[in-house]
Structures are given as C-alpha cells and as structure tokens.
Image: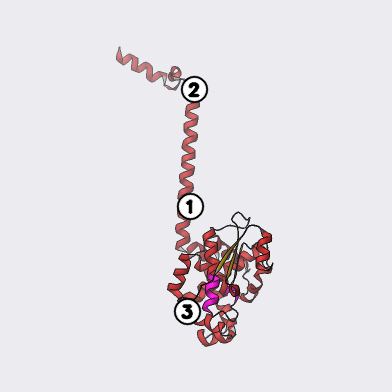
C-alpha cells in the first residue's frame, strides 16, 4: 500500500490520509457487518471513503485471484481518489474502478482477451451501465471492471493526468458529469462514452489483438516455452525407449543391427 500511496502522491499530488484504518475480516459474516452487506458475494475487499476504512477478507477466499498487496493497493486508490475530489460529490463508477485498477497494476493478458471477446461479439457495456456493477454476476462484473480500466486509461492517454485531476475535483464540487466533461474536455459525457467505445472496438478486437507488439512478444515467449517443454518431454521418451531396448536386446545381440554382407566382406579383407 505504501508504494501505491507514494506513486499516487507523485503523479497526482498529495492528499490527507491520516486516520485511515484497515480491517481484516476473518470470515464473510464479519466482512458483511463491516461493509453493511452492500457488496456482492464475489467482493473480497471494500473501501469506505467517508469512514476512511478499508475492509479486506482474510487470504484464502475463493475469489482471491490477485496478490494480497495488489488488492490493498486497489482499495487505497479508491480512498485517495475520493480525497482528491475533496470527499464530496459522486464519481462515475468506471472512473473510480479504472483509476484503482491502474494504480494497482492490475492489467494482464486475461483483460486483453476479455476485451477482445467483447469487441468481437459486440458485448461492450455502456459506461452508464457500469454503475450497477455490484448487482452483476462475477463474469459480467469482470467485464465491467476491465472496461472501467480501459475507459480510464483512454481518458488519461487522450487528455493527461492534469485533466483527470481537474475532472475529479470538478465532480467533487458537485458538477454533473456532463457539465464537467464539456467544460474540461470539450466533449459531453455521452460523447466521451461513444468515443471510448469506438476506440475500444478498434483497439481490442482480435485483429488489433494479434497486431499488438506486446501481445506478439508474449505469444512468442509462450511458444518458445511450450516448444522447449515438448522437446524435453520428447527427449525423455526417446531415452526411455532406448533403455527398454537395451534391457531387451543387450550388448550380445549387437549383430542383429549389423549388415551381415558388410560384416563378411570386412572379414575377407582382413584375411
């Protein structure tokens, strides 16, 4: 968490975070008591910015798929973002979750494939629909979180971190998303969503996926590892067969593998 904190301070400015508490719930019942039961069963951690509280389930929960430190960093980023907003107003859920995912370095090849499938089959969720993520099943929620990351990354790549700070602070003052986006980005909130969706479809469809150099290098590395493992397994199989043949035939049966005509001609030459 400390590494995430210092990185966010460096990129976005310092925020007051004294009094922050972290509670590790030993079971699901304790987790639900601490969070008010407002989180779905796939939720393993929660940030409550108003209370300055991070609640974590103890490691070992079935939905833990990421390192514990990464989960803590994600939840701290929620606290940071809301304090950057001044602790007021309401941030779009995709911005909140996307910011936290980027801060915790949660992007991996699975997210790439998930967006590729969504682009291929036209399954992208509108940004407004991501507000309901806590009501989604785990698979749909995974897509919603991945889209959130992609939407936030698109915002930061196109307009920069300073614009992110300005937007967050405007929303914290109570400006509506549409007013804040028009004033700061020059596009309406709905227009931003349409622009992101168009960019995501072109960037993450399978054609884009297989022309992405990062993906190609990862694929080549995977093929090399698989080829090496196959070659090693093949070599072990050949060695095993040789040992079996040696035990069956033994050195006394060497002449079975020698051309008798060649052997006779060799004997005549020697006489």
Mark 2 nearby-residue class (10 Å; few <14, some 14–19, many ≥20): few
Q: In this image, 174 relative to 226: left or right?
A: right
**Disc marking residue 247:** 2
Which sits earlier in the primary sequence, circle 1 or circle 3?
A: 3
In terms of secondary structure, where does tag 2 sit? helix
Q: Is residue 181 above or below residue 76?
A: below
Task: Give the quadrant of residue 151.
Answer: bottom right
Q: Do labels 2 and 1 touch, CB within 8 Å?
A: no
In magenta, the rendered stretch is 77-94
Q: Which residue is under mark 1?
A: 222
Judge whether residue 212 is colored magenta. Answer: no
Mark 3 nearby-residue class (10 Å; few <14, some 14–19, many ≥20): few
Can I make out residue 143 in this image? yes
Residue at 56% across, 67% down:
21
Q: Do labels 1 and 3 touch, CB within 8 Å?
A: no
Residue at 45% across, 45% down:
228
Q: Position of residue 117 (x, y in %)?
A: 59, 63
In terms of secondary structure, where does tag 1 sit? helix
Q: Which residue is under mark 3?
A: 159
Which sits earlier in the primary sequence, circle 2 or circle 3?
A: 3
**Disc marking residue 128:** none
Residue at 40% across, 19% down:
261
Q: CA distance from mark 2 to mark 3?
A: 72 Å
Which sits earlier in the primary sequence, circle 2 or circle 1?
A: 1
Task: Give the quadrant of residue 174.
Answer: bottom right
In terms of secondary structure, where does tag 3 sit? helix
Q: Is residue 217 above or below residue 177?
A: above
Mark 1 vs mark 3, foreground winner is: 3
Q: Do labels 2 and 3 touch, CB within 8 Å?
A: no
């Amino acid at each position: 968490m400390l590494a995430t904190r210092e990185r966010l301070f460096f990129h976005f400015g310092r925020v007051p975070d004294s009094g922050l508490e972290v509670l590790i719930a030993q079971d699901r019942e304790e987790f639900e008591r601490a969070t008010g039961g407002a989180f779905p069963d796939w939720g393993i951690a929660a940030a409550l910015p108003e209370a300055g509280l991070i609640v974590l389930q103890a490691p070992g929960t079935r939905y833990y798929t990421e390192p514990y430190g990464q989960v803590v960093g994600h939840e701290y980023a929620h606290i940071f973002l809301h304090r950057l907003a001044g602790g007021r107003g309401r941030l779009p859920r995709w911005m909140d979750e996307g910011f936290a995912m980027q801060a915790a370095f949660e992007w991996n090849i699975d997210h790439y494939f998930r967006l590729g499938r969504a682009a291929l089959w036209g399954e992208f969720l509108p940004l407004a629909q991501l507000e309901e993520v806590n009501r989604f099943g785990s698979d749909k929620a995974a897509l919603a979180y991945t889209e959130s990351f992609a939407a936030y990354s698109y915002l930061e790549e196109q307009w920069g971190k300073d614009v992110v700070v300005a937007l967050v602070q405007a929303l914290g003052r109570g400006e509506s998303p549409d007013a804040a986006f028009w004033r700061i980005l020059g596009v309406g909130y709905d227009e931003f969503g349409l622009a992101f969706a168009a960019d995501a479809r072109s960037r993450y469809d399978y054609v884009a996926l297989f022309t992405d150099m990062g993906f190609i290098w990862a694929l080549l590395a995977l093929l090399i590892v698989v080829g090496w493992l196959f070659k090693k397994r093949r070599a072990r199989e050949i060695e095993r067969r040789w040992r079996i043949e040696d035990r069956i035939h033994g050195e006394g049966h060497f002449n079975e593998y020698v051309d008798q005509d060649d052997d006779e001609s060799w004997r005549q030459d020697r006489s």
